[in-house]
Amino acid sequence: MERIELENISDFALGDENIAFAPYFIGKSYISLLNDNEIRIHNVTFEPGCRNNWHIHHGSGQILICVGGHGWYQETGKEARLLKSGDVVYIAPEIKHWHGAVKNEAFSHLALSVPIGSSSNEWCEAVTHEEYGKL
């Protein structure tokens, strides 16, 4: 997908290709830091079919605010939830989950987190093509 198309997914800055976290994603994503005063806010944009690995936020949860396109969110042991612009997802600490774009459309969300002392992310296994293909 062309960069200019991705820039039109939401009104927030697309940012740079998400190289630092690329090992934890299937497909290409982009990240833009919008705020790092007290609450970290990133705009994360996923190309069609892109998703992150299963992961866990230790010590601090996360809030996703969907701002463009359509995506998926799934917690371990639960059905995947289709996301659209305006949806809000609260992810409690210690919940294993993943999120990303639907197969044929880019997706963008704001990711809000409050850094607390030793909070961290634990990256787990990839969402397989078989799991993703069933959605």
Image: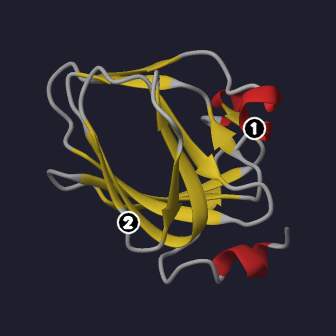
Q: CA distance from mark 1 to mark 2?
A: 22 Å
> 48 or 45: which is nearer to us?
48
State the residue position of label 2: 87
> Which type of secondary structure does the marked residue at label 1 adopt?
loop
Disc 1 + disc 2, Cβ < 8 Å: no
Residue 40 image position (x, y, % from top left): 28, 51
* 52 in relation to 35, above or below: above
Q: For residue 120, what is the image quadrant? A: top left
- Say which amino acid is labelled 2: Asp
Please give the name of the residue rendered at 76% of the width and 81% of the height, measured from the top-left corner: 4
User: Can you say which quadrant of the picture contains the C terminus?
Assistant: top right
Please give the name of the residue rendered at 78% of the width and 44% of the height, measured from the top-left corner: 27
* 45 in relation to 56, above or below: below
Residue 36 image position (x, y, % from top left): 27, 54
State the residue position of label 1: 134
- Left or right, 90 with respect to 121, comes to left
Please give the name of the residue rendered at 54% of the width and 79% of the height, measured from the top-left corner: 10
- Say which amino acid is labelled 1: Lys
Determine if residue 15 is in view.
no
Please give the name of the residue rendered at 64% of the width and 47% of the height, measured from the top-left corner: 18
Residue 68 image position (x, y, % from top left): 54, 74
Residue 66 image position (x, y, % from top left): 44, 65
- Name which of mark 1 and mark 2 comes first in the sequence: 2
> Which type of secondary structure does the marked residue at label 2 adopt?
loop
* 28 in relation to 117, above or below: below
